[in-house]
């Protein structure tokens, strides 16, 4: 091999080495995102979309989601005060931190659930320092729990929504427990609305309205499961609508129990009937109007 060829091969070897170094080991890679709306994609993501209603009173505002003092994501508001955060949470409890030249404070104990989007209207007060969530809507993908899993969401200002696009909305099996105590509950466009089996327990309580609407059974209970739908301890004109287009409003079997406890108006309807009870199941709808 002549000298020119040797020099050419040597240059090629050095080039390959440096390219490999920069691709593999020459830069820091950060997962989870710290930019505007960062975070990883796929199942389990949590999104918070907010608007600071009085953003014009401040300079540029940085908004962060924190968990145990670890920043999950951060972004800055646009000129209208809008922001978006995207992240994952191992505990389901985060804090929102707001920072500008004239404001620096956190709102702790924000409850979040995987595969959900929270939409918040927020006001920042400078003196005394105060963060107020004026409206909080949660749009949840379908819920499915098994084993000994427990999900508890208690927040009196939350308007909770599931829009399943024809899928099953809430499913619980084994000894899992689902509890929602919120301002209002709207569960629509379901194949099955609520299905509980084995010894699972589902409790849905709201200060205001509860709507459960499905194509098949709106509430289906099997085995030794329990479903309770009703008013909170401090209701504000709580009403309940449970409706199935082609099956039963409530279909209970085994030793399961269904309790419906409205403050005011309550209606249950189904294409095949409002309520169907099999074997030793128990259904309490004493304060509701039943219809086809």
Image: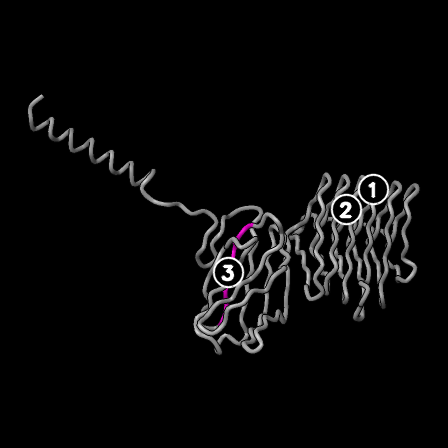
Q: Tag 1's secondary structure?
A: loop
Pointer 2 residue: 195
Classed neighbour count for the residue bearing mark 3: other residues with Cα under 10 Å, few (<14), some (14–19), many (≥20): many
Query: Which residue, given by chain and number where applicable, does mark 3 sit on?
Result: 64
Say whether disc 3 or disc 2 marks the residue closer to the N-terminus.
3
Q: Which image quadrant: the N terminus?
A: top left
Check the image and report above or below for 270 versus 145: below
Q: How is the image coloured?
A: one colour
Gap in Å between the C-alphas at discs 3 and 2?
37 Å
Q: Are marks 1 and 2 in contact (CB under 8 Å)?
A: yes
Dot placed on the residue nearer the N-terminal end, 1 or 3: 3
Q: Which mark is residue 222?
A: 1
- Say what secondary structure mark 2 lies in: strand
Which image quadrant is residue 259 in? bottom right
SS class, disc 3: strand
Q: Position of residue 14 (x, y in %)?
A: 20, 33
Taking the spot 47% from the left edge, 54% from the top edge, the residue there is 38
Q: Residue at x 71, y 40 (%)?
A: 146
Q: What residue lies at 58% left-to-right and 76% top-to-bottom?
A: 128
The answer to if 85 sits in the magenta stretch is: yes
Region rendered in magenta: 81-88
The residues tagged by marks 1 and 2 sit, at their Cα atoms, a distance apart of 8 Å
> In x, y percent, where is residue 88?
55, 50
Q: Nearer the viewer, residue 108 or 208?
A: 108
Percent x, y of residue 226: 83, 47
Mark 1 vs mark 3: give the one in front.
Answer: 3
Q: Relative to 120, say whether 24 is above or below.
A: above
**Residue 246 vs residue 112: left or right?**
right
Secondary structure character of the magenta stretch overall: strand
């Amino acid at each position: 091999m002549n000298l020119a060829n040797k020099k050419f091969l040597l240059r090629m070897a050095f080039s390959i080495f440096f390219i490999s170094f920069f691709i593999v080991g020459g830069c820091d890679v950060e997962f989870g995102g710290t930019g505007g709306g960062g975070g990883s994609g796929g199942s389990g993501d949590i999104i918070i979309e907010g608007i600071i209603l009085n953003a014009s009173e401040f300079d540029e505002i940085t908004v962060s989601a924190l968990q145990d003092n670890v920043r999950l994501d951060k972004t800055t508001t646009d000129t209208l005060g809008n922001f978006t955060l995207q992240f994952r949470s191992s505990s389901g409890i985060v804090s929102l931190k707001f920072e500008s030249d004239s404001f620096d404070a956190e709102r702790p104990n924000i409850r979040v659930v995987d595969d959900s989007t929270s939409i918040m209207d927020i006001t920042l007060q400078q003196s005394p320092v105060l963060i107020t969530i004026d409206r909080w809507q949660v749009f949840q993908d379908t819920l499915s729990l098994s084993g000994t899993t427990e999900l508890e969401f208690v927040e009196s200002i939350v308007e909770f929504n599931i829009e399943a696009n024809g899928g099953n909305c809430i499913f619980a099996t084994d000894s899992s427990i689902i509890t929602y105590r919120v301002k209002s509950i709207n569960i629509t466009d379901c194949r099955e609305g609520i299905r509980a089996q084995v010894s699972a327990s589902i409790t849905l309580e709201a200060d205001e309205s509860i709507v459960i609407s499905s194509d098949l059974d709106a509430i289906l209970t099997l085995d030794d499961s329990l479903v309770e739908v009703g008013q909170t301890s401090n209701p504000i004109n709580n009403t309940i609508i449970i409706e199935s287009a082609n099956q039963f409003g409530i279909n209970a079997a085994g030793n399961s129990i269904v309790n419906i406890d409205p403050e005011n108006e309550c209606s249950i309807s189904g294409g095949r009937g409002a309520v169907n009870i099999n074997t030793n199941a128990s259904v309490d709808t004493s304060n509701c109007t039943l219809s086809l």
